Image (cartoon, rainbow, N blue to C red):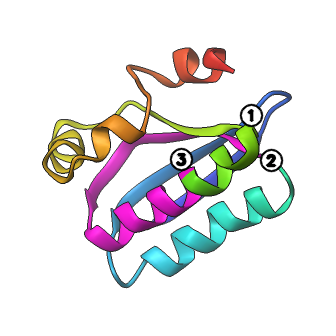
Amino acid sequence: MEIKATQYKHCDLVQVTGRVDSATAPAFSEALGRITGDARYRIVLDLSRLDFISSAGLRVLINTQKECKRYNRGELVLASVPSNIQNALDLSGFDELFKSFPDVLTAVGHF
């Protein structure tokens, strides 16, 4: 798994490449935690290069979303979600918890 974070004026863009599973979820959580730890709560997660996400990865998404939405500070939105990842979100019922956008530009424009 590879994570690249870019800070913009209105939000942070996080690009994830590879797999998020039980082995890589702690590093994924740490990367998102650094952003929220710096009081930046508007996050766009680019999933276009993500191959797989396990329940551990989904748990990281939920925990980050809770942190971002606490006290109405911001939110975590998803961009360019591959169909297999979208199916995992649908099956778990998590699709209702995240706004999804077809591309990164639209997602960043949301903020």
| Picture quadrant of residue 22 | bottom left
Viewer-closest of 108 and 55: 55
Q: Which mark is residue 98?
A: none
Q: Amino acid at mark 2?
A: Arg
Q: Alpha carbon of mark 2 to alpha carbon of mark 1: how far?
A: 7 Å
Secondary structure under badge 3? Answer: strand
106 shown above or below 94: above
Where 48 sits versus 4, above or below? above
Q: Name the spot of residue 109 as percent of width and height, x first.
A: 64, 15
Q: Which mark is residue 11?
A: 1
Query: Between residues 6 and 99, which one lies in front from this camera angle?
Result: 99
Label disc, if present, on residue 40 of the rendered structure: 2
Residue segment shown in magenta: 41-65
Q: Nearer the viewer, mark 2 or mark 3?
A: 2
Q: Are marks 2 and 3 in contact (CB under 8 Å)?
A: no
> Dividing the image into 4 quarters, which one contains the N terminus?
bottom left
Q: Name the residue furthest bottom.
A: 23
Going from N to C along the chain, the mark reached first, 2 or 3, is 3
| Circle 2/circle 1 CB separation < 8 Å | yes
Residue matched to label 3: 15
* Placement of the C terminus among the 4 image quadrants: top right
Residue 94 percent across, percent down from the top left: 30, 47
Task: Label 1, secondary structure: give it.
Answer: loop
Nearer the observer, 22 or 76: 76
Amino acid type, label 3: Gln
